[in-house]
Image (tube, rainbow, N blue to C red):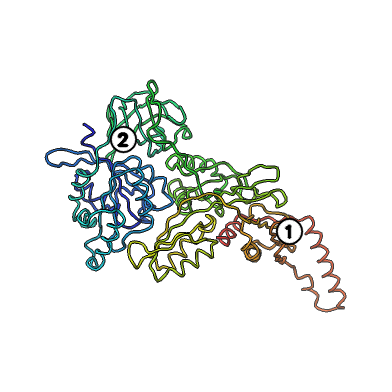
Amino acid sequence: MSCNYIRNFCIIAHIDHGKSTLADRLLEHTNTIYKSDKNQLLDDMELERERGITIKSHAVQMEYKYKNKVYILNLIDTPGHVDFSSEVSRSITSCEGALLVVDCTKGIQAQTVSNLSLALKKNLVIIPVLNKIDLSHYDSTYEKAIDDIIKLVKCKKEDILHVSSKNGIGVKNVLDNIVLKIPHPNGDKKASLQAFIFDSLYNPFTGVELLFRIKNGNMRKGQKLKFMSTGKIFYAYEIGILKLKRIPKNMVSVGDVGYVISGIKNISEVKVGDTITDAIHPAIKSKDEFEEIKPMVFASIFPINSDKYEDLKSSIEKLQLNDAAFSFKSQFSTALGSGFHCGFLGILHMEIIKDRLEREYGIKVLITIPNVLYKVFTKDNKVILVKNPSEFPDIEKFNKVEEPYVLITIIVEEMDIGKIISLCIGKRGTIIDNKYYLTSKKIKVSFEIPLSEIIFDFYDKLKTISKGYATFDYIFIGYRNSDLKKITVLVNHEKVESLSILSHKSKAIFLAKKVCKDLSMVIPKHQFSIPVQVSVSGRIVARETIKPFRKNVIGKCYGGDISRKKKLIEKQKKGKKRMKKIGKVEIPSSAFIAFLKVKS
C-alpha cells in the first residue's frame, strides 16, 4: 500500500484521563477487536491494570474505511507518568501526529504539558480531544477545560473534539480527523533502509524481537541488517506488521510499523532507540539521532533467597531488553550477598521493576534505599562518579561535591500555593517562576531543586497538600555544588558500609540521630552489650547501646552472705567483657530490611 494511506499517531494524556479506554474504542470502531468485557486491551500487564497507568508503549495497526478508501492507522500507545518519559519520546519519534486527550473534569495537567512540548518539538500535528463529556458535572466544567486547551494548543474552539471514551461518543469523528489532519509519512522507498527501533522484547524461542517504524527504504524477509550505532549485523528471519497478533509479511515499506525476529540471543547487542539499516548498502546517517538514556536514581537489588541469584540475573537481563532506561551491574554486599546495582528513571520506575521481578519471574527481592549520582572532585584533580554512599571518599580526600538538580514545574490551585512553596523551600528548592496559568484560579510555579530531595516522599506530600489536584513534572538541568556529608554506622565499633547514607549538611545530624535510635531497635540482642554509633564525616554524633541478654546468676541464692551474690555478678561481668572483645555482631537481613523501611 502507498504510504499516502498510512497514518502514524500516538495519544498524549495525563494518568487517568481516559487514554487507554479511548484506544479500546478506536480498536472496536475499526473492527480490529470486538466489544468485550476486557477493558484497556493495550495495557496487558497486570501492574498496568492495577495501577491504572500505562508502563510500556504498545503498537497496533487498524484499518479504517473513509470515503471508500482504506487507510492504515498505526497507533503507538504511550505512558503518561514522568518516570517513563523515554518511552514517550520514542513513541513520539515514530509518529506524525498525536491525539491530546484532556479530562473535561480536570483540565490540563503538568505531565500533559510536558509530553505535548515533546510532540511539538518533533513537529507533530496535534488533535485536541475533550474526554468524559458524559459525566454529570460536564456542563459546569467543560468550558474551563476548553479555554485551557485553546490557550495551550492555540487552536479554535471548533477544532476540539468532544468524546466519551467510556460510551463511544464521538469516536468516528476522531478517526475521521486522524485521516484528514495527520499527514502521511514522508520517506523514499528507493533510499537505503532506515528503521527506527522504538521497543524490543525477548522471546525464549525466537530470541530478540524488535519493533520499528520505517523512515526510508524497504525491509525484506531474509535481508542482512545492521544496527547503525553498534555496527552489529543480523538477519531478518521473520518480519511483519503488528495487529493484536503478529502478521508475517515478505516486505514492509516506508511508513510501516512492524516487527522483525532477528535470532539474536545476546540481549546486550540490542539498543532501543537505534536505527536499523541494510548491511550491504547501509545508510550514511541515521534519520533519528541515537541517544543513550541516562538513569537518574540508583539502588541495589538483592534476592531474598541467595540461591535465586542466577535466576535474578537472567530476569534482569530480559527486563533491560524491554526497558532501555533500566541499567544494572553486579554487586556484592557482605550483609546481603550477591546482587545488582541498578539505575532507574525515578522511584515509580524502580517500584515497577521490583513488582515485575516478583510477579513475572517469581523472584522475591530486596531493594536498598535509592540514591542519585554524585560527582566528587578529588584533590588530585580526578572526578569520581558516586552511585553508592559506600563509595563516597573521606572528607580530607576531595575538594568539592556536585549533586544533580532538576527543574520542577507544579500546576496547583491558587489556595494551595503557599503550602506548595513551603514544601519546596523545605526541600532546598529555589523558586524560579510563579504565575497564573491558563486561568485565574491555577498557578504554575517552577523550582530548581536537588533530585535527591524529590525521590522519596515529595510526590506524596504534594498530593496530600493539594488534596490530589496538584500535578508536577521535572527535567534534569545539570550539577551544582553541594555540601554533602556521609553518615556512617558503626556497630560494636566496626563500620557497616551497607548502612551508609549521604545527606546535606543541614539535615545530617538530625538524620544521624534518628538512624541511630531506630537501628538500635532492629538489631537483635546478643550475649554482650552492643554500642551503635553514627558518625557524620568521621565525627560521632549519636550513640545507643543494645543491652545484652542476661542470665539471673543469683536466682538460686536464697540466703547466705551478700558478698556471695556480688562475687557471682562480678564473675558474670568479666565474662561479658571477654565475650565483647572476641564476639562478632551478626546483622541479619531482616534487620537490614527493617532499617530500609526506617530510612524510607
* Residue bearing the label numbered 1: 492
x then y, percent, for residue 304: 55, 50
Q: Amino acid at mark 2?
A: Gly
* In the image, residue 415 above or below residue 371: below
Where residue 227 appears, x then y in whole percent? 42, 29
Query: At label 1, which amino acid type do we have?
Result: Asn
Query: Any mark on residue 378, and which?
Result: none
Location of residue 240 with respect to 35 vertically, above or below: above
User: Is 423 positioned to the left or the right of 569 in the image?
Assistant: left
Quarter occupied by residue 257:
top left
* Count of numbered circles in the view: 2
* Secondary structure at numbered mark 1: loop
Mark 1: few, some, or many residues within 10 Å (few <14, many ≥20)? Answer: some
- Image side of residue 121 versus residue 531, left or right: left
Q: Position of residue 380 (x, y in %)?
A: 70, 42
The disc label shown at residue 258, or none: 2
Is the residue 43 above or below the residue 261 in the image?
A: below
Q: Earlier in the sequence, mark 2 or mark 1?
A: 2
